[in-house]
Image (cartoon, helix red, strand yellow):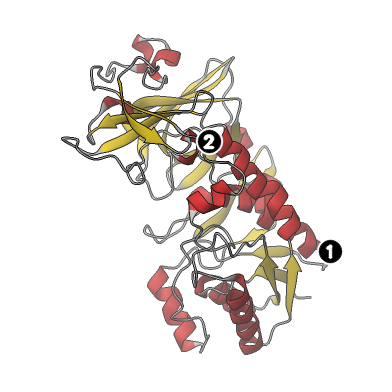
Amino acid sequence: MKKRVVVGLSGGVDSSVAAYLLKEQGYEVIAMFMKNWHDDSVTISNECPWLDDSNDAMIVSQQLGIPFQTIDLSVEYKQRIVDYMFAEYERGRTPNPDVLCNREIKFDIFLKAALKLGADFVATGHYARKGETTVNGNTVYRLLAGKDPNKDQSYFLCQLRQDQLAKALFPVGELLKPEVRDIARKAGISTAEKKDSQGLCFIGKVHLPDFLQQQLKPRKGKVVEVPANSSIFSGAAHAVELAELTQPYPLNPDSGEVVGEHNGAHYYTIGQRRGLNLGGFERPLFVIGTDTKDNILYTGMGEDHPGLYRRGLFLGHEDHWVRPDFNLKPGESKSYMARIRYRQPLEPCTLFRRDEGIYIVFDRPQRGVTPGQFAAWYEGEELVGSGVIA
């Protein structure tokens, strides 16, 4: 009897080819399009509107001769992703909705809907791979980087659990993007030349200030320019307290001089340069800190300002292990490669488990360590864990 797979067909070429490959491999394939939260008032026009994507997905299903369904997850998406984003920005943090979309929507609500249809697996067009190993006689699933180094999307899956990975298939993970488009062309799939979406998970490209102003009202506040009068500590991790190595740059209203006004500290993120609308400085200003309580925006001049860099970060107990058997015990430490944002090259680091939580100390300072974002750590090509930066 054929195994049944429900493919999350987004209307793009990657998920289209995923569905095609699964059918070629002998699976019984059902296509399902997820309609998630959508608001025309904040979506930049003609960038991945959901209706066009839905039509493209339906056409591909017809071309492949597979059943097609639409599932409306807009209520759940609003509750689990959009409301979360507003809450995080209000706290002065920068969320990653795509990571949450995979954990909360695609591999939770969507997965449950697929299982109700009798699915053995769900599949997506992610550039990632799944492997298996055996630990103490039990099967353990591995989340591996995609073969295409320019498209690897394992980072976006960094919060998946073993039970979610067990039911996941990533058919294009072994391929390079040009190979995926070539397969689509040869198979006559209508999305073969469709441009990749650059927007939020199943929403499209959003004009962030308009999006945030729906809930977070403008609030005039001071912009403080902080002089670069401190240096990054460059000693070994064991030479000083971990808490010291992972502290953000020290900032307070007396750290520098007021150089302008902003419309709300919650609209900005660390490392940001655009949108400050402040001129007359010797070098560009960058955001090095936000205080949403007192509504102060801290800036530093130049790419090399020490406020842009940190040796490490603290996760507290917000760590998640894709490989639970790799979890550290209090007092333990281990070297890994890690990234703190999508597409960032992997950087050598050491994880330390202490009673108060996990610390990550990098071999060299990292630019733009941003609270609310996800750090993910790898052993070789395997993503083994992740956590929310405190």
Residue 225 relative to residue 35: left or right:
left
Residue found 68% across the figure and 66% down from its top: 34
For marks 1 and 2, give the one nearer the viewer. Answer: 2
Residue 308 image-quadrant placement: top left
Q: Identify the amino acid type marked 2.
A: Gly
**CA–CA distance between discs 1 and 2?**
34 Å
| Residue for badge 2 | 372
| Residue for badge 1 | 116
Q: Identify the amino acid type marked 1.
A: Lys
Residue 11 lies, with reference to residue 137, above or below; the image says below
Residue found 48% across the figure and 56% down from its top: 207
* Residue 19 appears in the picture as rendered: no
Q: Which mark is residue 315?
A: none
Task: Tell me the element at label 2.
Answer: loop
Residue 90 lies, with reference to residue 234, above or below; the image says below
Residue 259 image-quadrant placement: top left
Q: Position of residue 136 (x, y in %)?
A: 67, 37
Toward the viewer: 357 or 104?
104
Toward the viewer: 379 or 293?
293
Toward the viewer: 380 or 52?
52
